[in-house]
Image (tube, rainbow, N blue to C red):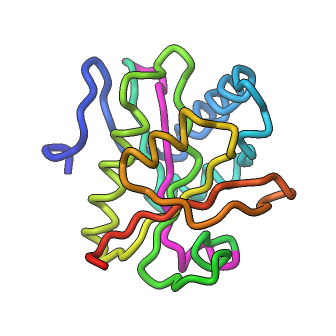
Amino acid sequence: MQDTAPRIEGLTLRMLTTRDVPAMLTLQEQVMATLEDPAWYYPSEEWEFASAAVDGEAWGFFDGDTLAGFAEMTPGEKRGEHSYARKLGLPVEGSYDFHDVMVAPAMRRRGIQTAFLRLFTRLAKQGGGTAMYCTVDPGNGASWRNFERFGYRVVCTMPAYDGRMRRFYRLSLTQE
């Protein structure tokens, strides 16, 4: 996997473990503190990051020993009622949710989110995936423009989480 993993100069990529959960929480706090609008991101709890790390769903880029950015990809079937496909009334089987992407403020604009998009698309296809989903706050243009450049398409805009409006995006992994 590492031979075909996305590369970013000066950073190393690896799957995260439970030992990385404190760094994930710290990075989440740093990102939340610098967002133009804190409503753009619905924070995850420690147990959620730990679960993703245990299940091999969380990946991170490191600058030496410092977590520069991380993201998670979870099969829709595992997310149950929280699956983006299920919320949209679309088939959950073969779907994956791209979520909890965090990039340290000092590391933005280096291609970390795009590298995760490439990595997760490849992993989902290898796992027999048919579609990737994500949600983005309509005001977070930097994020949703990156998803759209990568080929994600808006399915709809509707309330999610605690009623915050979100754009729901889908990337087909098969020829339609």
Residue 144 located left or right of residue 125: right
In the image, residue 82 sits, relative to residue 30, either above or below, namely below
The number of numbered badges drawn on the structure is 0
Residue 111 image position (x, y, % from top left):
36, 30
Query: Which residue is found at the position 79% from the left and 61% from the top?
Result: 159
Q: Quadrant of residue 43?
A: top right
Q: Quadrant of the C terminus?
A: bottom left
Residue 153 image position (x, y, % from top left):
47, 60
User: For this rendering, which residue is in front, 109 or 126?
Assistant: 109
Q: Residue furthest toward the right? A: 162
Residue 163 located left or right of residue 172: right
Query: Which residue is found at the position 48% from the left and 31% from the top?
Result: 69
Q: Residue furthest toward the top? A: 106
Residue 31 located left or right of residue 9: right
Q: Quadrant of residue 125?
A: bottom left
Q: Does the magenta stretch include residue 74?
A: yes
Q: What stretch is highlighted in magenta?
A: 64-81
